[in-house]
Amino acid sequence: MNLKAIFAILIVFIGCCCNAVSLELIVRLDPGAGNLVTFLHFLMIAVIGSITSRCFTVGRKIALRDYALLVLLFFGSNVCNNYAFNFNIAMPLHMIFRSGTLMANMIMGIFLQKKRYCLRQYSGVLFITIGIVLCTLVSSANIRNRTHATLKVNDATGSATSDLFWWSVGITLLTTALLVSAYMSIYQELLYKRYGKHPNEALFYTHLLPLPGFIFMAGNIVQHWQIAVSSPKVAITIGSTDSWSIPVMILYLIGNGIAQYICISAVYVLTTECTSLTVTMVVTLRKFLSLIFSVLYFRNPFTISHWIGTALVFFGTILFANVFIQLRDAFRERVLRGRGHTLLLAVIG
């Protein structure tokens, strides 16, 4: 593994974990801010990309028509994921659900690419599926038990409806986003095979081209921007005399956008420098650390059933990615190179 890959892994952990923390801070202040968060992500990354990637001055490597479907899929999955917070979806459940990427990829691979997998991979996906279903059922029971809680779904009229029904809508959005994201990865793989890997260009155009689509969400975005502007203010002091007051939610949104850019840029670079196994494990471990921090720091409700479901999800991911075999082979190779103990190789092999 080269220094560029190691640096990308470090940035993934820092950027993505900061992104998860700032997103939870935003959602706690305004659960309906999903569209606003998504729009600011796309806008900020497109603006930064136009400055740093020189995509306007250097010819595209991938045809614009081939970006169309990729952009549509990327836009749809991001909107669904972030808008799900508007339907009583807790951050830990959101993280666990999004960890089902391998399961969705396998389903898409079987039906679209006619792929076949080994027993170990099927077993890994089975563990992931059981873990997600367990966490979802437990969360569903918690929602049913909250008889006095209501969720305002229509921001304009403030009408309250059944928590459980709208929570189910949130789960449907997460499921849709999971399948769309899986199909997007397959399509992205096809584009990379056809044109080569161009992470900076793909990052820029997948965030620039969907921006007009947010016109249809303009009312919702403006409404939640006003909520952000009217949030409690914090004083920021620069130097010894200068001081400004800024709404705390605006501060969170800025931090979240920067962290998102750092996170997704590092992931795009990592896909060009490492195997899919390495990328999968880095992203999965990052999600696990974010989940632990969310539960411990924000004191999110997390029962023993949630912990069991989480363990199943991450064990299934490790099993699918063949980590145990990789570690065994790496250990055997190190022993063979370093000491040459043939007896020890015979014992472990």
Image (cartoon, rainbow, N blue to C red):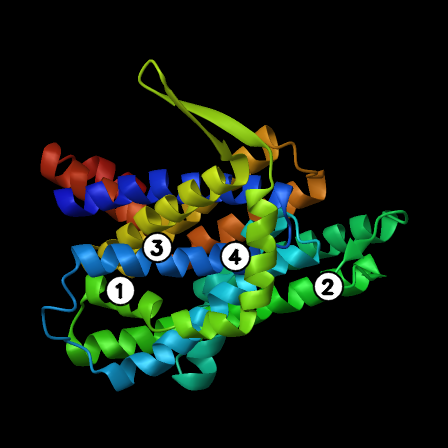
Density class for disc 4 (Cα within 10 Å; few <14, some 14-19, many ≥20) is many
N-terminal of the two: label 3 or label 4?
Answer: 4
Q: CA distance from mark 3 to mark 2?
A: 28 Å
Horizontal placement of 19 versus 57: left or right? right
Q: CA distance from mark 3 to mark 4?
A: 12 Å
Q: Which residue is identified by label 4?
A: 36
Q: Nearer the viewer, mark 1 or mark 2?
A: 2
**Label 4 residue SS:** helix
* Residue 233 percent coordinates (x, y): 55, 31
Residue 156's label in the rendered image is 2
* Residue 14 percent coordinates (x, y): 35, 38
Q: In terms of image quadrants, where is residue 175?
A: bottom right
* Residue 226 percent coordinates (x, y): 58, 50
Q: Which residue is identified by label 1?
A: 204
Q: Which residue is identified by label 3?
A: 44
**Label 2 residue SS:** loop
